[in-house]
Amino acid sequence: MKTWLLIFLFFASTGLLAQQHLPVPVIFDTDIAPDYDDVGALTLLHAFADDSEAIILATISSNAFETTVPVLSVLNTYFNRPGIPIGVTKTVVPRKECSQRWAQAVINKYPHPVRSNEEAMDAVQLYRKILSSQPDTSVTIVSVGFFTNLAALLRSKADSWSALDGRSLVIKKVKHLVSMAARIGPDGKSGYEFNVMVDAAASRIVFDEWPTPVTISGYEIGEKILTGIRLIHNDSIQNSPVKDAFQIALTKDNNTTGRNSWDETAVLVAVRGIAPYFNFRKINLAIEDDGKDVLVPGEKFTYLTFRQTPEQIAQVIEDLMMHQPMQHSRQ
């Protein structure tokens, strides 16, 4: 028997050949506009896709503000994936604006084939279309905005895309939900967090009824991880909507230390896993009428805690945020 065959049989028998990780299929659900850590998060996702660590199935906005779809189109186009499906909630609320106007600036400067929210598919319809076409229990949803779309998905009915109702479709197709949401203070008490509060009724539905494993990166995680300063001072990066968004917003905020990296942590964990960056504890949360998240008995959610220091994690995240588009996209 030839030497190469003996080597192959040895590795096959030990299972080492099966240890290569397949790319994670991701639907990215964002409120992109009121903050710009969403830009960093989507940049991480494109970097992972270029390295065959992820497949971006769709980018969907939970925010009806007019810049959301064009910004998603700008970023997808910049990273040579202009054909990624884009969805948006068609409800009149939530509608959170981009007060720093970084979104308007990158829309005016960079090409984007999807020009308006009206040109994008309804968020729930896109969810149902994408999920129905995927292998069972394969999709990871990364939610870094409001829970508007996810609650509507759970309550959706059978349609031309699937004979299943929304909850059944999620059970069949979704493997994991990773969310930047909620807040637990240093005193161990829960509190208020923007993503949860904006559409509290939707948040309650998702926290009460979501039927797959859920990992949560809380406010206090991303609050301590600061990024963006190295990015905006990197002279080798030119004509980048990512750099422009951070440069405009950080300058307007007179911020010289970096932006809190809330949303980036959710993408990092969704694709690469909790270790080696974080530890976790098992908790349960209920959402009150005003959007306050309250600790209740149970272990429904995997809730991140620090393992590496915030500075170590910031280094990893900002390195990924400086990723440049590949000449030929793999997706």
Image: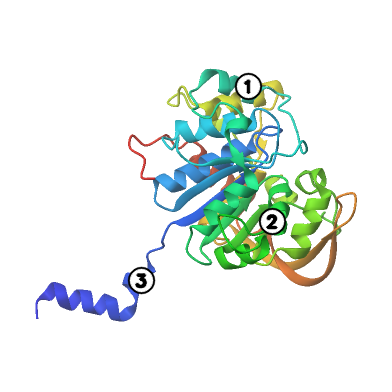
- Residue at 67% of width from left, 64% of height from top? 167
Which of 119/275 is in front? 119
Q: Which mark is residue 18?
A: 3
Is 272 or 278 nearer to us in this picture? 272
Quadrant (top left/top right/bottom left/bottom right) for the C terminus: top left
Label at residue 104: 1
**Viewer-nearest of labels 1 and 3?**
1
Q: Is residue 313 above or below residue 37?
A: below
Q: Secondary structure at mark 2?
A: loop
* Total tally of numbered discs in the picture: 3
Q: Which mark is residue 331?
A: none
Mark closest to the chain's N terminus, 2 or 1 = 1
Callout 1 environment at 10 Å: few (<14), some (14 to 19), or many (20+)? some
Q: Are marks 1 and 3 in contact (CB under 8 Å)?
A: no
Residue 288: image location, x then y, percent: 89, 56
- Per the model, the C-alpha gap separating discs 1 and 3 is 46 Å
At mark 1, the secondary structure is helix
Res. 194 in view: yes
**Disc nearer the start of the sequence (1/3):** 3
x and y, in percent, of residue 191 in the image = 85, 52
At a point 59% along the width and 40% down the height, the residue shown is 121
Residue 316 in the image, given as x and y percentages of width and height: 52, 46
